[in-house]
Amino acid sequence: MFDPVEKLKEFIRQPSVSTDPKFHAGMKGAQEFVAGLLGSLGFAVEVMKTDLHPIILATRGGDATWPHVMIYGHYDVQPADPLNLWKTPAFEPTIVGNRIYGRGAADNKGPLMTNIAAVGRLLEETPKLPLRITFLIEGEEEMGSPSFPKFLAAEKARFQAADFVYLSDTALPTPEQVVITCGLRGLALFDLHVTGAKGDLHSGLHGGVLHNPIQALAEIIATLHDPDGRVNVPGFYDAVLDVHPWEREELKKLGADEKAYKEFLGIDTFYTTPGFSPFEALRFQPTLEFNGIGGGYQGEGTKTVIPSTAFAKISCRLVPNQQPDRIKRLVQEAILARAPKGVKIAFVDQHKGDPYVVVPPDRSNTPKDQSPVLARAFRATDKAVTEIWGRPPLYLREGGSVPIIADIKRQTGLDSVMLGLFLPEDNLHAPNESFNLDVMQKGIETTRRILAAVATK
Amino acid sequence: MFDPVEKLKEFIRQPSVSTDPKFHAGMKGAQEFVAGLLGSLGFAVEVMKTDLHPIILATRGGDATWPHVMIYGHYDVQPADPLNLWKTPAFEPTIVGNRIYGRGAADNKGPLMTNIAAVGRLLEETPKLPLRITFLIEGEEEMGSPSFPKFLAAEKARFQAADFVYLSDTALPTPEQVVITCGLRGLALFDLHVTGAKGDLHSGLHGGVLHNPIQALAEIIATLHDPDGRVNVPGFYDAVLDVHPWEREELKKLGADEKAYKEFLGIDTFYTTPGFSPFEALRFQPTLEFNGIGGGYQGEGTKTVIPSTAFAKISCRLVPNQQPDRIKRLVQEAILARAPKGVKIAFVDQHKGDPYVVVPPDRSNTPKDQSPVLARAFRATDKAVTEIWGRPPLYLREGGSVPIIADIKRQTGLDSVMLGLFLPEDNLHAPNESFNLDVMQKGIETTRRILAAVATK
């Protein structure tokens, strides 16, 4: 079997930033790396063209009566900027202690490599394992998987031929406590552009006669939350489902410490929807956040300009049963209604995704018609995690989004078993991202046992 | 005599952006160009070191009984960005019709060249002119003249030896109507930094638990104006003096057209302090503007980050008798009082300047002790403008700032005669800045006649 850490280094060295066309070579390198590695394990590899970045499908077929797992991952990563805040080069993997540093180390190259290595080990020891496996590795996750819906529609039959999806692109709250993610937030993103005068103006010669677009943008943004932290958009919460009681109980078992979380974040005061602890809020409540803002002069010193335009990048995280298109419309309508009359408003829609929830077996609200293979996979996961990590996993929703999980469910009925492997301190989407190599080793053995147990009939 | 247009081209070709250290060579080139040109006219040139950019003093001495004019200008320019909006290269002077395009063409290289050419022409025809002339050309005007106060304190005697300051760094409202600027707004500038978590965060994993600094910044900014357009900072207007009735009357003579001004700006609605027309507001009222804002991801596509920090660049334009330090303190106190508790606030002070007013002779509020040479300069200006432009000048305050004019007045008692030469369509501080060459030719002759008349005893 290959050395998973050495292979992970090779993978990180490919700067596969999907959102920025400058990184075309890195995207191609990462895609060829994954295809080559899966081919070397005996998989039949197809590189499926899309309008943007190819999707890799790697298949191990077998008897139609064998269970069939589809393992998901993504080979693309977030942009690495601001580069000046990285202590080691973003695309040069660097091991310090039990951590490997580099963009994508935790999201998702390390966890994906964990699952590939588990399959490699399992097939090496049991070459005739009665399990069909399909790897589905996409290259657009960090930009919202724009090509995925078309691919899913075209290849629906392949998904329907599987029993469940297995992935590791979710979080591990501490190195001791595994979480099986049973829900993901959805997403609705757009850019807001506010325009005042037709060109930039001298703030002395023209200051005091028109509504500055930076000011107008701020005035609009400032209306979008109540002082208590709720999103102040009519209808925003209408479709939000109440949390099932076992979910709140399960979250309590996590024993998360508010003081420690404050210290981790470096803040003095939480700011959550009233009635929800911070740990509840980020799992059970939707948000409206500002991911970026810009306008006018941003350099050193001063430039006394009234800019013509200013913008903000807005994202909503959604929970069941909020619909991205509806939420986007409600927020945009609120913005249009509240914009000062001296400015013009424009929106540029970005990507979106539905929220997702799956209920493990043996819960009060488990669907009666849950697939037996899915139930077996959940039970195998519980057992493997308890053996290797020393305590059973918790079944929690998480705040992040993997929109294709909801797409797959809606289009093909397939549910997902999500074993979280990245830690809060892994700095996802931020400078100095890293992945814990001890977690990786335990993860390989966990996935190996899960898949072995699913295969046993 | 040299060709003023050719010399102006040479001057524009020096990219003398004072606020950005990358333009060191351009600053040095512009300074050497000015020193060389004034030397060629027979002036004794001194290049006075400061902590940042040198000040050029060029002297034509004479009998102590001769009147003494100090001609002010600046050889630095604003940054040229956003460069992609320039139709011709910012630092390659380009003549189209009767206009010369390039950064600094109108602010202040063209008007300064006008006055140098006028002096050149005057001394060529009257080499023994009984007039002492000192050129004072600084290199930090566009960054708020930080070295000037120290220079002024050290060289006070030189200023006190002069009778008045003459300059062309103010506006001409139309090519037909000259304005003698009798007041300038002051300035108080600072940057506001808002910090939330200690690092950038993933908006899925942590969204919904903390106050996003972009949101907090917007919430703060949104409090700083009333919906009707007044600055909403306690005490902000306390020191504002009422306008003298002749000033409103004089402004009416300008016959400015609100509809045409809206079209020029490209806006549908004015936004002014209540009770003031837009033309009054920008001359008689203070402002609080946002010159820049930034934070989080600003690139293409999306990055679902909650940034650690966001900032705004804030500037106040001030009118008599507002004091920059007091106004800055009031605004900063209001910001601190209104900041949400989950974020940290920091200020970085930028430059500042006092407002300034001078009253021409023969007005109801002309000071009894006005200098006779200053009064003669005003009358000579009125006559020269009437002869050359076909109608008398108007005496108006303007919205822009030349902070050193107030400094000179306060420290040495010298008042200034300001002949405006740049037009609204000249795009000062914005892309595609240009200067009208017909205005330049008329300006040369106007300044020549004014100085000739001041010299005649």
Image (spheres, coloured by chain):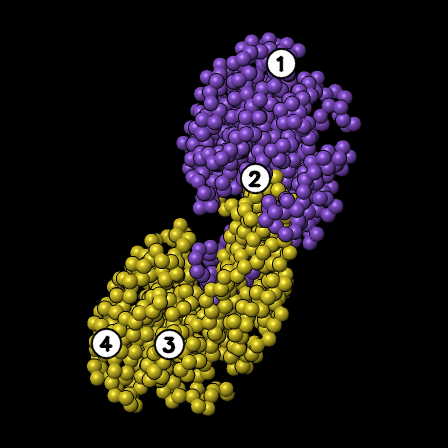
Chain colours: A yellow, B purple
Instruction: State whether discs 1 and 4 lie on one chain.
Output: no
Query: Which residue is denoted by mark 1 in the rendering?
Result: B455
Tell me which amino acid carries mark 3. Answer: Leu
Please tell me whether mark 1 sits on a helix, a strand or a loop. helix
Foreground label between 2 and 3: 2
The answer to whether the residue labelled 3 contacts the one labelled 4, judged by CB atoms less than 8 Å apart, is no
- Residue A20 vs residue A276, the one in the foreground: A20
Foreground label between 3 and 4: 3
Query: Which residue is denoted by mark 4 in the rendering?
Result: A44
The answer to whether the residue labelled 2 contacts the one labelled 3, judged by CB atoms less than 8 Å apart, is no
Residues under labels 1 and 4: Cα distance?
Answer: 95 Å
- Residue B125 vs residue B355, the one in the foreground: B125
Residues under labels 3 and 4: Cα distance?
Answer: 19 Å
The answer to whether the residue labelled 1 contacts the one labelled 2, judged by CB atoms less than 8 Å apart, is no
Query: Which residue is denoted by mark 2 in the rendering?
Result: B425
- Give the image location of residue A254, x and y in percent: 48, 74
Residues under labels 1 and 3: Cα distance?
Answer: 87 Å
